Amino acid sequence: MTLSQFQVRFHGRGGQGVVTAAELLSVAAFYEGRYSQAFPTFGSERAGAPVAAFCRIADRQIRTRSPVSRPDAVVVGDATLLHSGDLFAGLGTDGYVLVNTSGGIDRPALDRRLAELQTERIAALPATELALRHLGRPVPNAVLLGGLAALCDVVSLASVQRAIAERFTGPLGAANQAAAAEAYAMVAHPAELSGASPD
Amino acid sequence: MLRQIEGSQAVARVVAACRPQVVCAYPITPQTHIVEAIGAMVKSGELPGCRFINVESEFSALSVAIGASATGARAYTATASQGLLFMMEALYNAAGLGLPIVMTLANRAVGAPINIWNDHSDAMAARDAGWIQLFAESNQEAADLHAQAFRLAEEVSLPVMVCMDGFVLTHAVERVDVVTREQIDAFLPPYEPRQVLDPSAPVTIGAMVGPEAFEEVRYLDHARHLDALGSIEAIAEEFAEVVGRPCGGLLSPYRTQDAELIVVALGSVLGTIHEVVDEARDRGARVGALGITTFRPFPLDAVRDALGGDARLLVVEKAFSSGFGGVLSTDIAMAVEGAPSRISTVVGGLGGRAITETSLRRVIDDALEGRLERLEFLDLDRGAVEAELARMAANRRSGPVAENMLRSLSASARRTGGGRP
């Protein structure tokens, strides 16, 4: 696949690891021979405070340093953010959305832009539940990357796994890899996803 | 070695590969990741022959570096913002004593109001302290410039400050070819000091100098700075031979050939500027860019050559001198004949506000159409400014400006249901 530029914006809360998620995505893309750039919205880090992070992936050097204002994909690490702020600003009708929620996503009620998205480009993933089950901690970043790899095919699960393994060693790495793999399967085969239909 | 790596980590690895003997620092955002990483390398034994010295302030950090350097050790420190200002007295001493200390400045705004985000007001505050100041455009350049900085500092006996945009570069993860210890060893000889505190051959360093010789000592500083211009070019060329890619030097021109407008800037905003220059070229507008890699010493002749002709000049600056205007643009005006009528200064990106393609596109279009004032403020919220001016005119006890601005912004965000992204 050739890629002029694919831009991802992650929204989450301090402590969920969304900055790390953006970094790991950039590392996964690097493993696939692409150029990539990840950076956070820089702030005084506080647990629970809204945080955004960005990742750009391209087949040529990425020069721009401005925040991602027209994302191709938006990843929402905490569903309680959905009603605060304009998470989907700049998202086109061919965009992708991945939301960490144990419930479904009420698309039209949430945002008219979500109603315009193709059904297969929007996914709900119980990422915190998966993280708790695999890691024993509510840190859904690696899980979300597994889901994102299944949703938009911009990096492979194998590259995501490799990036996770490089960052987290030992049992933590293995648990994150397992969680990401399960997330990948859930998003790739949504019919088997219980209680989290996209609509 | 090609890596996908955070800018701070890349810089830490290159600094370590340069085999510093004393590293001392006091933590301050956004520089902290760099010295943390070097500290970890010292502790793990990965960096033998290096002492990491914890100090209680930035003033002490640079003072320790000065002492270490005077005894012949290769010394490194890093800071930002208020930390640099707290070093100010020692900054002048390091330069006046001719000690080749290398420092990373993770550029950050200076308070008040307190702000941890990126702009260039810290570097500008130290502009006249006698340090060589190099500005990195990307993390590749930030990493590479550190290797060149040690070589340069020791060759010309002057301290070198490598400026990299805080957060924008320090916290960005991107592809960097991190030079190896072997490459550094082929490029950077062991430090041979011109002067050294050595008990077996005692000398005095830092004597009081009266009016009979102070001007001469200062002139020699200036002469060394001018000599450094040649060294910077030669070192950049030699570095390029060792690593197989260009980096550093005095300037970085981009599509300036036949340009009718040249955008001049320092640091990481050049990447975004290059994107906008390419767009403008695609639609037939003759626009180019000039990056000033070496800001002190200022390469007057090279800038004059690069900006010759009659192109309009748009200087984009992340700092300014209150009550006057642009800092870099003043230097550009010194270099270029007929400059005052050709230059517009756009101040932007203050305190971490993003300089976006959209905003740059707009000022470039305005510059091409001759619609720019001599000094403009990018994306300034005029409504908020006017409201505060009106409040101040109406009420003597109008209160603290910064807090008033925050209150009026949050009130307007409530009215419109959104805030500044």
Image: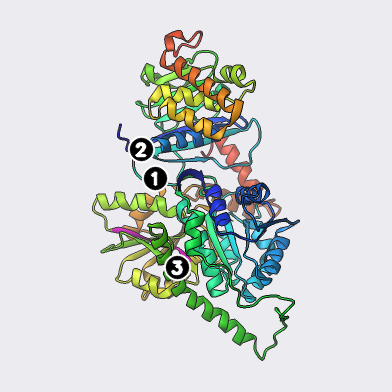
Q: Label 2 vs label 3: CA separation?
A: 35 Å
Q: Amino acid at mark 1?
A: Ile
User: x, y percentage for residue B342?
Assistant: 36, 68
Q: Label 1 vs label 3: CA separation?
A: 27 Å
Q: Amino acid at mark 2?
A: Gln
Q: Tell me the element at label 1.
A: loop
Residue B322 visible in the picture: no
Question: Is B292 part of what is drawn in magenta?
Answer: yes
Span of residues in magenta: B287-294
Q: Tell me the element at label 3.
A: helix
At horizontal 58% and vertical 73% (from top left) the residue drawn is: B192
Determine which residue is flagged by label 3. B235
At horizontal 37% and vertical 21% (from top left) the residue drawn is: A116
Residue B226 visible in the picture: yes
Question: Is B105 part of what is drawn in magenta?
Answer: no
User: x, y percentage for residue B91?
Assistant: 65, 68
Residues packed near mark 3 inside 10 Å, few (<14), some (14 to 19) or many (20 plus)? many
Determine which residue is flagged by label 1. A62
Q: Quadrant of the C terminus of chain A?
A: top left
User: x, y percentage for residue A78?
Assistant: 56, 24
Q: Label 2 vs label 1: CA separation?
A: 9 Å
Q: Which mark is residue A6?
A: none
Of A146 and A117, the residue lying toward us: A146
Vertical arrangement, residue B237 with respect to residue A47, above or below? below
User: x, y percentage for residue B14?
Assistant: 53, 54
